[in-house]
Image (cartoon, rainbow, N blue to C red):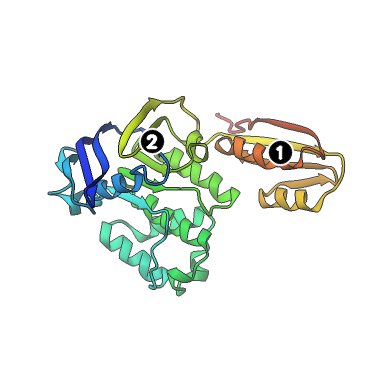
Amino acid sequence: MINIKKLVKNFHRQNVLDGIDLSISKGERIALVGSNGAGKTTLIRCLLGEYQYSGEITIDHLFVKDHRQTLLAKIGFVPQLPPPLKMPVGQLLDFAANLCRSPRSKMEEMSIRLGLETQSIWHKPFVKLSGGQKQKLLIGIALGRNSEILILDEPAANLDPIARRVFFELLAERQNQAIMLMSSHRLDEIAALVNRVIELDRGKVILDDKVAENNLSKILTCKLVVNREENAFIKTLENWHFKAENNYSWFGEISSVDRLKFLGVLSRYAGILKSIHIEEKVDETVVV
């Protein structure tokens, strides 16, 4: 449980957070949205105990100001901009595991599930990784900690479609055991992930509303038929790991969370699309 009361943060006599009152419970997946400068990052930094502020923030009845180190052990944080760390990947995993007293093997497991080949980058400096590799590793570390609170800033940025699908599956595994706070300046990027939306503007909460639940682990099958071949379209579908049944028919799977994103991609090729068929994947598990 996170409780925030009359939170105020000033920079150069200007209120960046202006009397924030919030209560957040386990199982809530929150979209923290607002334009640049609305106060999203400042609120996150206050939750992490990085800023001095007036008002109160408690996590599980402990004040962040007084128990920062204890509470940080409960939080998995993925920043929007990866830190410019020069240490090798293997050393970073050791450091993270020791810092939060969590098994390194779990962090590696999460990273591998996201598609990161840890062995091949073992001795490579973190700063030399691609954007996608950095994101997968940081998410792997955060989820591998088995944190009670996940704070994710632009969480799906730099992830390829398959990694996004796995990421949603990993969140689904934790959705009832953790608080998830996901920050973005665009609600449409994370709307399907959350069950509550909090919007900030000029340091104030202007919207706090529950939204319909979405099954993060649901998979959709999709069949596309086109009336002619086009290289750009083929490359796009290959990026989504679709397979060609023949020159004019393609088949693949997408996460239900990515439905709108995928349809947005297809809209670029409306001129060649003959038919689109999307349905929920049938669970083939047999119970004896």
Q: Quadrant of residue 137?
A: bottom left
* Marks 2 and 1 in Cβ contact (< 8 Å): no
Amino acid found under the numbered disc labelled 1: Ser
Q: Which residue is mark 2?
A: 30
Amino acid found under the numbered disc labelled 2: Ile
Instruction: Tell me: residue 4, above or below residue 115.
Output: above
Residue sitting nearer the eye, 13 or 6? 13
Percent position (x, y) of residue 202? 33, 39
In this rendering, would 240 be left or right of 63?
Answer: right
Which residue appears at 41% of the width and 72% of the height?
A: 88
Check the picture and name the quadrant holding the N terminus.
Answer: top left
From this viewpoint, is residue 59 visible?
no
The furthest residue to the left: 66
Percent position (x, y) of residue 215? 50, 31
Check the picture and name the quadrant holding the C terminus.
Answer: top right
Instruction: Tell me: residue 175, above or below residue 157.
Output: above
Q: Earlier in the sequence, mark 2 or mark 1?
A: 2
Residue sitting nearer the eye, 265 or 165? 265
In this rendering, would 80 be left or right of 130?
Answer: left
Q: Residues within 10 Å of mark 2 (few under 14, many from 20)?
A: many
Which residue appears at 58% of the width and 35% of the height?
A: 256
Percent position (x, y) of residue 224? 76, 38
Which residue appears at 63% of the width and 32% of the height?
A: 281
Percent position (x, y) of residue 34? 41, 39
Q: Which residue is mark 1?
A: 267
How far is the residue under mark 2 from the one under mark 1?
A: 29 Å
Mark 2 falls on what kind of element? strand
Residue 196 is labelled as none
